[in-house]
Image (cartoon, rainbow, N blue to C red):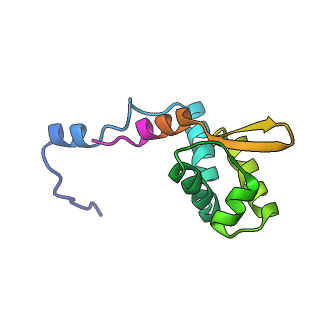
């Protein structure tokens, strides 16, 4: 049984529903799915939002542990997932390890999600 959606004129639909620069290739879909998977955990989103709220300056695990109220091993685990996905950079500074946001993947996600 066909369902009528009462959609507007075809020209309006194509303007409204253009996704980024067009359909994704299989490799692009896999890459973006990996980014979305890394972002799908609430703790990771909280950690990321804390880094972003601080102006995206590099932070150490201890600072994030205090800010988000999550144990150090758990924060380290989530930071590793975000680094592995390419969303954060990890930089050693002597004995400290700093994490900072990589803006490029977020710009790419914005382009992919740009609808309309």
Range of the magenta residues?
110-116
**Picture quarter containing residue 18?**
top left
- Where is residue 65 drawn, in percent x and y? 71, 63
Q: Which percent across, then down, holds residue 7?
A: 18, 53
Specify the farthest residue to the left: 9
Quarter of the view holding residue 87: top right
> Which is nearer the eye, 70 or 25?
70
Residue located 56% across and 40% down the image: 32
Q: Quadrant of the C terminus?
A: top left
Asked if residue 85 lies left or right of residue 111, the reply is right
x, y percentage for residue 31? 61, 37
Identify the residue at horizontal 77%, vertical 67% (top origin): 71
Examine the rendered structure and indicate whether residue 77 appears above or below residue 42: above
Residue under the point 57% across and 56% down = 50
> Quarter of the image containing the N terminus?
bottom left
Query: Could you say which is closer to the camera, residue 34 or residue 66?
Result: 66
The residue at 82%/62% (across/down) is 73
In this rendered view, identify the residue nearer to me: 104 or 53. 53
In the rendered image, residue 75 lying in the magenta stretch gets the answer no
């Amino acid at each position: 049984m066909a369902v009528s959606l009462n959609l507007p004129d075809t020209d309006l639909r194509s303007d409204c529903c253009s996704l980024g620069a067009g359909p994704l290739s299989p490799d692009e879909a896999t890459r973006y799915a990996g980014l979305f998977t890394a972002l799908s955990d609430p703790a990771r989103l909280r950690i990321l939002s804390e880094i972003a709220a601080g102006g995206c300056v590099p932070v150490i695990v201890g600072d994030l542990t205090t800010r988000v109220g999550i144990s150090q091993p758990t924060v380290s685990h989530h930071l590793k997932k975000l680094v592995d996905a390419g969303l954060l950079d990890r930089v050693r500074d002597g004995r400290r390890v700093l994490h900072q946001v990589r803006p490029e993947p977020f710009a790419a996600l914005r382009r992919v999600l740009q609808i309309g």
